[in-house]
Amino acid sequence: MSDGADRAGRPRCHHCEDVIGVFEPVVLETQSGPYETSLIVDPWLAESRDPCYHRACYAVSHSECE
């Protein structure tokens, strides 16, 4: 299980720490840049060690960097 997942293996948002739902848009922060998808499209995200964010949380957490 990845560090950013709950006991059921569902990924948690790196910003708000809430569970990311299967149908919610998610941003995965990879070495090659942000990748927007959802768990229904890419179920392997539950096993990813890259930080995952709700789309809105990603926008908030990265807007202060710009």
Image (cartoon, grey):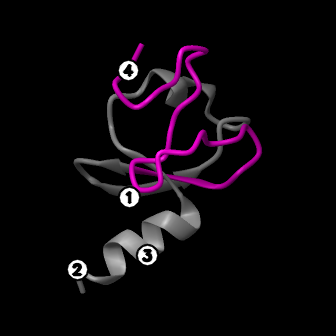
SS at badge 1? strand
SS at badge 3? helix
Mark-to-mark CA distance, 2 and 1: 14 Å
x 24%, y 86%: residue = 66
Q: Which residue is mark 3?
A: 60
Mark closer to the chain start, 2 or 1: 1
Q: Is residue 56 above or below residue 35?
A: below
Q: Which residue is mark 1?
A: 34
Mark-to-mark CA distance, 3 and 4: 23 Å
Which range of residues does the magenta coloring cover? 1-28
Mark closer to the chain start, 3 or 4: 4
The crowding category of the residue bearing disc 1, from other C-alpha atoms within 10 Å (few below 14, some 14 to 19, many at least 20), is some
Q: Which residue is mark 4?
A: 2
Q: Nearer the viewer, mark 1 or mark 4?
A: 4
Q: Which mark is residue 65?
A: 2
Residue 49 at what x, y percent from top left?
33, 29
Amino acid type, mark 4? Ser
Amino acid type, mark 3? Val
Amino acid type, mark 2? Cys
Mark closer to the chain start, 1 or 4: 4
Q: Main secondary structure of the magenta part?
A: loop
Identify the image quadrant of residue 61.
bottom left
- Quadrant where the image shows the N terminus: top left
35 vs 44, left or right, is left
The crowding category of the residue bearing disc 4, from other C-alpha atoms within 10 Å (few below 14, some 14 to 19, many at least 20), is some
Amino acid type, mark 1? Pro
> Is residue 16 on the magenta stretch?
yes
